Image (cartoon, grey):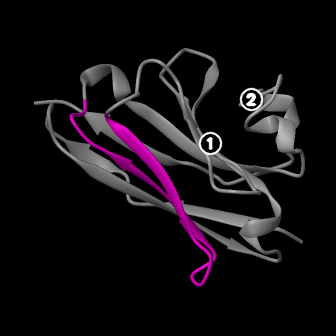
Amino acid sequence: QVQLVESGGGLVQPGGTVRLSCVASGSTLAYWSVAWFHQAPGKERQGVACITRTDGTTYYGDSVKGRFTISRDHAMNTAFLQMNSLKPEDTGKYYCALSPSGYACDGPTTMVLPEYEYWGQGTEVTVSS
């Protein structure tokens, strides 16, 4: 059984930095497309970043390009989301998710929710002064 556990969220001031972690167990991250999704209060969950299972190519939502960086450490079986220059609109719950499909990152269904099979429980990020 694949399990994902996110951590690293918290309260941060606008312009600040947070690094989220997603530890996987039950499978090797290298076999999956990995994505981070953001769900703002009262809004639908949306993809913010993903990394391919093949060559580690990364993709970002327009609202986070240049500010967020997704990465993974195979030895730790962990994915990360480095979040810089945070804005109040980045507030919400962040989920990591795995997809067996290469198209879920770098394809026609990049960061489309139904493509992702396994989800963590999420970690809250609040950006406020």
Q: Secondary structure at mark 1?
A: strand
Give the numbered dot on residue 50.
Answer: 1
Q: Are marks 1 and 2 in contact (CB under 8 Å)?
A: yes
Q: Is residue 95 above or below residue 128?
A: below
The residue at the point 61 percent across, 65 percent down is 5
What distance separates the C-alpha of mark 1 from that of mark 2?
8 Å
Residue that mark 2 sits on: 110
State the image coordinates of residue 9 (x, y, percent, origin top left).
37, 52
Q: Which label's residue is closer to the chain start, 1 or 2? A: 1
Q: Residue at x 40, y 27 (%)?
A: 64
Q: Position of residue 32 (x, y in %)?
A: 80, 58
Which image quadrant: the N terminus? bottom right
Residue 87: quarter of image? top left
User: Which amino acid type is marked by label 2?
Assistant: Thr
Between 31 and 38, the one nearer to me in the picture: 31
Q: Look at the magenta stretch and give its main secondary structure.
A: strand
Q: Which region is colored magenta?
A: 67-86
Give me the residue at 51% from left, 58% from top.
Answer: 71
Relative placement, left or right, of 103 versus 44 is right
36 relative position to 62: left or right: right
Which residue occupies the extreme left position in the image? 129
